[in-house]
Amino acid sequence: MWKYIVTIATLIVLTAPAGAQLTSQQQRMKDCNTQASGMSGDARKQFMSTCLSGGGTKAPALHHRQALR
């Protein structure tokens, strides 16, 4: 029994990614999320949708309510 457990544990360790690198979609999500910091509500949803679809990676100007502060 222990032989099987050790074998399975060894296989899991050997098949795990060495550097836990992000996929391109995960990296895009991380980048878009960073750029959307400070945004909220519908403006954030719209920005994230556009950014994740590749339509643009620059955060828009502050939301109207945020600009009034």
Image: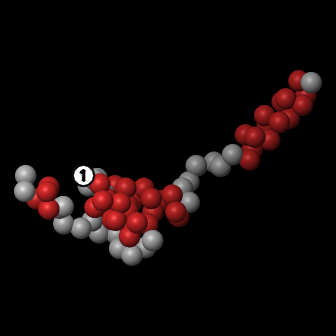
The number of numbered badges drawn on the structure is 1
What residue did someone put label 1 on? 38
Q: Position of residue 38 (x, y in %)?
A: 24, 52
The outermost residue toward the left is 68
Viewed as shown, does residue 39 lie left or right of 62? right
Q: Secondary structure at mark 1?
A: loop
What type is the residue that disc 1 sits on?
Answer: Gly
Q: Residue furthest bottom?
A: 55
x, y percentage for residue 16? 69, 46
Residue at (53, 64) in percent of width and height: 24
In the image, residue 51 lies at what x, y percent? 38, 68
Q: Is residue 62 above or below residue 18?
A: below
Which residue is at the front of the view, 53 or 9?
53
User: Where is the N terminus found, in terms of image quarters?
Assistant: top right
Q: Quadrant of residue 44?
A: bottom left
- Residue at horizontal 52 percent and vertical 63 percent from the top: 25
Q: Residue at x 29, y 69 (%)?
A: 58
Residue farthest toward the front in the current orientation of the protein: 42
- Residue 3 higher or lower than 47, as above or below: above
Residue 43, picture quadrant:
bottom left
Q: Position of residue 29 (x, y in %)?
A: 45, 59
